[in-house]
Image (cartoon, rainbow, N blue to C red):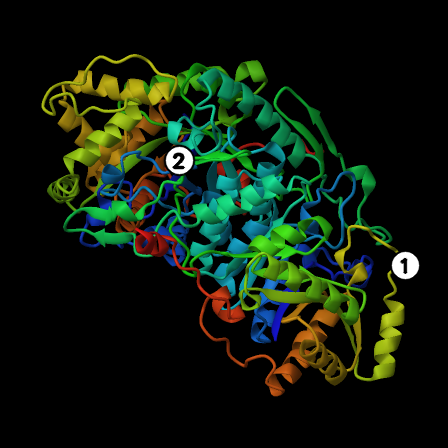
Amino acid sequence: MSGDRKMRLGAFLMAGGHHIAAWRHPLAHAQAGVDIDHFIELARIAERGKFDMIFVEDAAAIRERNPDMASQAARSTAFEPLSLLAALAVNTSHIGLVATASTTYTEPYGLARTFASLDQLSGGRAGWNLVTSASELEAENFASSGLRPHSERYERAEEFADAALAVWDGVEDGAYLPQGGSVFTDRAKLHPVHHRGKHFTVEGLLESPRSPQGRPIMVQAGASDIGKELAARTADVVFAASQTIGEAQAYYTDVKARLAKYGRQIDDIKIMPGISPIVGATEAEAKAKYRALQELIPDAVGVALLASYLSIQDLSAYPLDGPLPDMPETNLIQSRQQLIIDLGRRENLSIRELARHFAGARGHWQVAGTPAQIADAMEERFSAGAADGFNVMAPVFPSGLEDFVTLVVPELRRRGLFREEYEGRTLRQNLGVGEPAKR
Amino acid sequence: MHLGLSLTPFGHHPAAWRHAADIGNFGFDALLSQVARAEQAGLDFVLLADRLGARPIDDLSPVATPFEPTTLVAALATKARRIGFLAAAATSQHEPYNLARRFASLESISNGRTGWVAVTTSDNEGREREYVDLVGALWDSWEDDAFIYDKQQGRFFEPSKMHVLNHRGEHFTVRGPLNVNRSPQGKPVIAQFLSGGSKTLAAHSAEIVLLQGRTPESANETAADFVRLLEAAGRQRQDVRILANIVPIIAETSEAAQAASDALRFDEADRASQPLSASRLVGTPAEIADSLQQWLGHGQVDGFTILPPTLGMADLFLADVAPELQRRGLIGKTKAGSTLRDYLGLPRPAHPAATWERAS
């Protein structure tokens, strides 16, 4: 690894915090999920830390079917990501803004237009995390026919991504108000889309200048084989969930190895696994912070969350202190499911322990320790071919992000691992991924 | 009198860009500055009309705002915090759940200052009506006091105050509930442009009706016809604000205004340009105020949406006409309340659960 390679950092935002019980913390702002000024503050903290991007996840549905269970967590309502990031765009100046959006329940022209709008509002700082929406609850908000199979969703996603790219490429730089001033647009620089595919027909142009960064950044988190292939072909950034360094290295190597066949270089994709850091002045303080949060998780909520990620209706039939039952592979997020099963077997965890462990960071890597210990853990993976950077999932907002920015970021800088200043104004410039070919 | 400003980068005249051919007018800051002036002048809302949902096919329009309306509103609402926003979105371009969610999110961002201009393009009135009713029902997924944030008991919301819709209609199947809180103003305001096919639907569901006629008289006739439809639909006149589009052409003297109007002939007819058939009001600031005052007193119109032909005319309206309307007590110096419904004097819709309880 070259000496001047810098770590990429994303701030994964979520109302009160990533920890499932964060909202119950005495310091937590319980109404954070509907408070735009809370999110503006979080974005500014992350920007002060010179993070590459903020990131928000998405589901077009509530996340838990059982109302009693759902009512014990803060995950049933949230801002819609694109409107949230549009609001944050004009209250920040350098940080990237990555929103999750589904290819299964939207149309390419409308979604491409909305991301182009976010890109214009932010001066070229938008990114799209492409997902195919694996939950039954989402499917039920859009059709009576139920959740489409994984392979079918990805087939649609492939065509969707191509159509969206074509829409973004429809207007060249300099198409508006060309020199001379006698015409409003230079028709030679307009390339209306005529896409006719299996899933979509897209005709027309975006009513918008070309993005200052060429196109929005493409992000993906798919970990199935078909998902990794789509990422290798189209993504600039890949988010991942890996528990151990071995898993992270295997994933990293696998995705990077797929790039060559699409004529892409190894650095054209930045792989950024999630990390849930719990920062303390001492290790004991960090562990105490973590325990205090864990104690706020009602067993029912933890187990229900575990069941939902395992894609099974109910775990309550099994003893809480026993192991996970054997279960069939489902049509849903296969990779996440496997990760949980592996974690349970590897560490010999009961359903209760696994639920608590998992609920804390929802399957992502958790590190509780001093700033130096957290920096050590990040540096190890960064230097060992397991990560190009990290998507930081603070357990509680704003304090968890504030701690990371004031304590861990300076430590990463001392080690020469993280930027002192933003390199550019667009997300593409700051990430250091190539400009798409100009049209 | 209720007043709104229709937002464009250069003005509504198709050749307005020639007078201000600066790409800077395309940017967010320039649009925000228009909104801030409208807010300062005491207007109730700005309108993002979005070419009535028409997509550009092979060329781009100088009267279109180069942002998608809902994302633009989200951004503007954080910077201009005392004015409402109406954003057009076509029922043909969004799934009902996604549209309901986007506007509910705008309501959280703006603290209840937004409205949806429902652009219907299908001739299938049954579909359009099911769509609009479904969106309204999704906005009632949560009761106003559903969220209790009880940290001690670990109860974030009261489960009985979440309502799963389980809608299975002829055109849409949506389980619900919406994953966004009920709006601070109950629900976003529903607005519609009044056009041939949409009148019955507007009479059924619109709370703001935007209409236009070449003259105030023809606009008044359209308004009167609409009021008859409204009453036939069993709704009250006071539950709807009827606003006429106007194109103001303002100068220091009547003669100068007439000359400006002559210079702004719409000979480059652009069929996508909405204001071509809106009433032109030509005169000094006082004369424009007179015209508006008289119009308001004679007919069914509750106010106006300003479609300035150029940015200069927008500035003249906000700097000279609006203060004149304030002096006459026709618009308030400060706005009552904090939501778009407050600004327009529209009632806050009660959650239907109140009715269910009475019925049971």
- Which residue has dot 2 on it? A7
Disc ID at residue A200? none
Residue A376 appears anywhere in the view: no
Q: Residue at x 62, y 54 (%)?
A: B202
Q: Quadrant of the N terminus of chain A?
A: top left
Q: Quadrant of residue A203?
A: top right
- Which residue has dot 1 on it? B267
Kindly report the distance in space between the C-alpha atoms of the residues bearing marks 1 and 2: 58 Å
Q: Position of residue A265 (x, y in %)?
A: 54, 22
Residue A242 appears anywhere in the view: yes
Residue A262 to residue B50: above or below: above
Depth check, front residue: A140 or B40: A140
> Quick check: A250 left or right of A352?
right
Q: Residue pushed farthest bottom?
A: B327
- Mark 2 falls within which chain? A
- Mark 1 falls within which chain? B
